[in-house]
Amino acid sequence: MTRHTVMRLAIVMAIALAALTAAATAASKKPTLLLWTIQRTENSVETKAAKTYKPASVKVQIFANDPYKQKIKVALGSGKPPDMFMNWGGGGLKQYVDARKVLDLTPFLNADKAWKNRFFNNVLQTAAFKGKYYGIPNVGMQPVLLFYNKAVFRQNNLTPPKTWDELLSVVKALKTAGVTPFILGGQSKWPDLMWEEYLVDRVAGPQAFNAVVAGKKNAWMDKGIIKANTMLQQLVDAGAFGNNFSSTTYDGTVTATLLGTGKGAMELMGNWEYGAVLQNSPDTIKNHDLGWMPFPAIPGGKGNSKNIAGNTSNFYSVAAKSKHPAAAVQFLKKQVMSPAYVKGLIALGNIPPVKGIAKQLSTGANADFTTWCYKLVQSAPNYQHSWDQVLSPDAANTLLTNLDRLLLKQITPQQFSANMNKTK
């Protein structure tokens, strides 16, 4: 071997060694991202997305629901937050946005229109404030529907009500027949809110509650809100909820069993009630005796009859003080609601808030129901996120307390609005 050959070999080896060193250095610099979320069925999809992501090491920490709320509040306040954190959008997220604890995702979404257009806009808006986006949807949609027992309707020669007058007529007929028209878990309070959301929307339009959220003075005194609450008390007077609604709890079993067994004819509840009926009264599903419909139209009202209410989704946000914000954004873009992620959610019975998946839903379990829900959201001009998630925690608690008192006829609609106007 000549001296020149030895020198060339040494140079080649040095270059190779440098390349290996550079690769090792790059590997050692692979960012580590911390993601916080809550205990839920979808954890399997979340953790798989993290484990299969190669550009960064993503560690998922899972917490129980209630302790999580305090834990993320402390972490964001201390300046030592996780890179990414699960939240419910609305008022809970807004308080962190106002405190500048959350990264503005708008530039990233605007720079990649395909990413932004992947989602239903009416869902994405739940994590948007003043035209800027602060969260990406991470689970399925949960619109509130009007469920009904088809067997009860057949036995009483009734058809599903499409308008408010038809609904009142059905209530009267069922009460005469000795059947509780609507099941309501009033002891839990939050089920009451679904009636409030839909009635206010249909009567006063989305702008009434938008004014509340915007902090407009005396917004709760909107004539449409007072009228909607008057109609709600009229339902109580008509016996629409029976005599025991204030002592009926919602725990995923009680109301679903009442609906499935025909002890009550209808229930206004989130789409998760389908699964609850399937679990507690499977024959109702097997015999195709569970029906569902949109909330009825109210002629003369300002709200579009296609508007819906419910939980739009949960969201992932990036902490403003993340050490690797760009890497966190890339993870959200590449993994969350990717084809594999969507497939995983559908397998769990979720209805992802992304476009173009109707065919996938049509071949899944309970396809009739999931496809109907998907199309309902797809065609909704406005998807109102649950008020108790939009408002601050204190305002939400005050709302549920006053709504409970309204249904119990302890206060008038005017007193309800006056009480809520005092809430910050």
Image (cartoon, grey):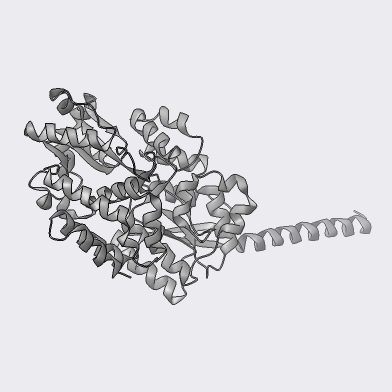
Where is residue 287 shown, x and y percent of the image?
Answer: 21, 23
The residue at the far bottom in this view is: 78
Decide: is 67 above or below 359: below
Res. 60 image quadrant: bottom left
Residue 231 relative to residue 91: left or right: left
Q: Is residue 193 visible?
A: no
Decide: is 316 above or below 382: below
Residue name at image x 89 percent, y 60 percent: 7
Residue name at image x 37 percent, y 68 percent: 217
Res. 323 image quadrant: bottom right
Residue 376 relative to residue 158: left or right: right
Q: Is residue 328 visible?
A: yes
Where is residue 401 shown, x and y percent of the image?
Answer: 20, 62
Residue name at image x 12 percent, y 46 percent: 237
Res. 172 image quadrant: top left
Q: Nearer the viewer, residue 168 or 377?
A: 168
Residue name at image x 51 percent, y 45 percent: 119
Q: Nearer the viewer, residue 108 or 242?
A: 242
Where is residue 274 shown, x and y percent of the image?
Answer: 27, 37
Q: Nearer the viewer, residue 82 or 106?
A: 106
Residue 43 relative to residue 413: left or right: right
Q: Quadrant of the C terminus?
A: bottom left
Decide: is 27 above or below 118: below
Where is residue 16 shown, x and y percent of the image?
Answer: 77, 56
Decide: is 296 above or below 109: above
Say how many tags the image has. Answer: 0
